[in-house]
Amino acid sequence: MTTASIHPDPASGGPPARTGRPLLKPQRSLVRRVLGATFVRWGARVGLVWVLLMVFAAVLAPFLADSHPILMKMDGRWSSPLLEHLHPADVVLLVAGLSAVVLLMGRRWSFAARARIFAIILLAASGLSWWLVHPPAVVVYQQYRQWQAQGKIQFALYAPLPYSPDDRLRDQPDMRLVAPSLQHPLGTTLNGADVLANMVYGSRIALSIGFISTGIAVAI
């Protein structure tokens, strides 16, 4: 494809002559070319969707599976036991996930600039969270179920799966090794822990191993 530019002919004084000049397409970066060649395949697209689902579960794990109520009203007082029991890793993942979404939407920054900004935010969030976030050392999951049965809790908003991965259901000994049900979609383990809750939090370990091993391979 060419564009024509008009220039007068000084020799003959005749009508202007047309000169053709090729229209150059803007060059795409190496990252864009690689991504474009990769995700043209359906297998890569399905894999990307699966990885994004795992990232979603890893970042929002406390809000997807947790025995602590997200919001609770007891004795006329409102509180958020879930936020009070967040660990530094939970806060870092939440900040990293939100920052990644915002930076991906910022088209005016280059990939290298967004990577540097993300690294700075991640380092700052890691330092601040380990310094400021201190969850209670002793955690008693069954107290919420007991308070609920006694009518002490006036309102409670739980996660879609109201079980933490290390909630052994000690107040419900008959819930060990139960089959999948509406209460426990994938059943429970030998010690009473919910299987699906462990899988949600296990996505963090799977992703960390995958990213670390892939990062070492890319660096080499």
Image (tube, rainbow, N blue to C red):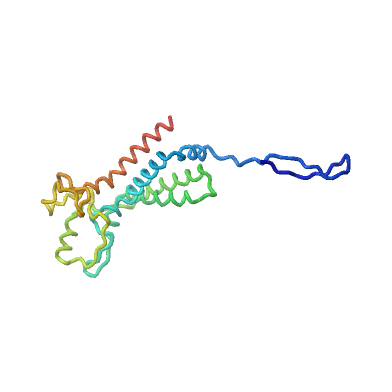
Residue 69 lies in quadrant: bottom left
Identity of the residue furthest to the left in this view? 174
- Vertical side of 73 occupied by 36: above or below: above
Count of numbered circles in the view: 0
Q: Position of residue 7 (x, y in %)?
A: 80, 44
Q: Position of residue 167 (x, y in %)?
A: 19, 50
Residue 150 lies in quadrant: bottom left
Identity of the residue furthest to the bottom in this view? 76
- Vertical side of 3 occupied by 159: above or below: below
Residue 57 in the figure: left or right of residue 28: left
Q: What residue is shown at x 50% (from left), y 43% (from top)?
A: 111
Residue 98 in the figure: left or right of residue 160: right
Q: Quadrant of the C terminus?
A: top left
Q: What residue is shown at x 24% (from left), y 70% (from top)?
A: 76
Identity of the residue furthest to the top in this view? 220
Q: What residue is shown at x 44% (from left), y 38% (from top)?
A: 41
Residue 124 in the figure: left or right of residue 64: right
Identity of the residue furthest to the right in this view? 12
Residue 155 in the figure: left or right of residue 35: left
Q: Position of residue 19 (x, y in %)?
A: 76, 40
Q: Quadrant of the N terminus?
A: top right
Q: Position of residue 159 (x, y in %)?
A: 27, 57
Nearer the observer, 111 or 121: 111
- Vertical side of 216 occupied by 6: above or below: below
